[in-house]
Amino acid sequence: MKALRLIFGAVFVAASIGVCAAEQPVSSANGMAVARSNACMGCHAIDRKLVGPSFQQIAEKYKGQPQASVQLEKKVKNGGAGVWGPIPMPSHPRMNDADIKTVVAWVLAGAPEK
Ligand code: HEC
């Protein structure tokens, strides 16, 4: 019985982490801080195109696509081109996954300033 309880416990914890991750409001301070400290803002602005599309354009394009965050996390990590034009986005192999998730969630939320 003890083992079973452990399993249920683990499933419950995993489920609640999942729920939190999905429902926690995006902290824009964090998302923006990650974007600033990883030089994303050198190529992206919130509301106008620079080298890359604006973060608001990106949010608009992927609105209502639940799989977009996974796809975009990979793209930020590995880089790539061809979605918005021929200019590639460089890879970010040194960013940790948590930072990538934070910044992508923030972008998909429309890159709110507060
Ligand atoms: C050297 C310039 C450059 C930097 C630095 C850069 N990007 Fe990009 N980014 C681009 C370009 C160019 C594209 C368009 C790529 C394409 O057309 O597929 C892009 C596309 C994107 C997309 C949309 C991808 C898609 O497939 O629709 C996201 C999200 C994104 N960037 C986030 C970031 C984040 C977060 C950072 C910082 C960690 C960052 N970018 C840093 C140039 C850059």
Image (cartoon, rainbow, N blue to C red):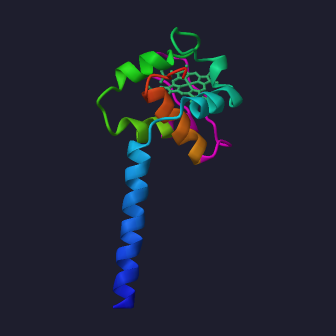
Q: Residue at x 54, y 38 (%)?
A: 102
Q: Position of residue 14 (x, y in %)?
A: 41, 63
**Residue that extends furthest to the left in the rendered view of this protein:** 64
Please say whether residue 88 is one of the residues in the magenta stretch.
yes
Q: Position of residue 90 (x, y in %)?
A: 61, 29
Which quadrant of the structure image shows residue 88?
A: top right
Left or right: residue 56 versus residue 1 is right
Which quadrant of the structure image shows residue 43?
A: top right
Q: Quadrant of the N terminus?
A: bottom left
Judge whether residue 55 can be spotted in this image: yes
Q: Main secondary structure of the magenta part?
A: loop
Q: Residue at x 44, y 42 (%)?
A: 24
Ligand 1 shows up in the quarter that is top right
Q: Position of residue 68 (x, y in %)?
A: 38, 35
Q: Residue at x 57, y 46 (%)?
A: 98
Q: Position of residue 105 (x, y in %)?
A: 47, 35
Is 80 rendered above or below residue 71? Answer: above
Q: Residue at x 65, y 30 (%)?
A: 33
Range shown magenta: 74-96
Q: Quadrant of the C terminus?
A: top right
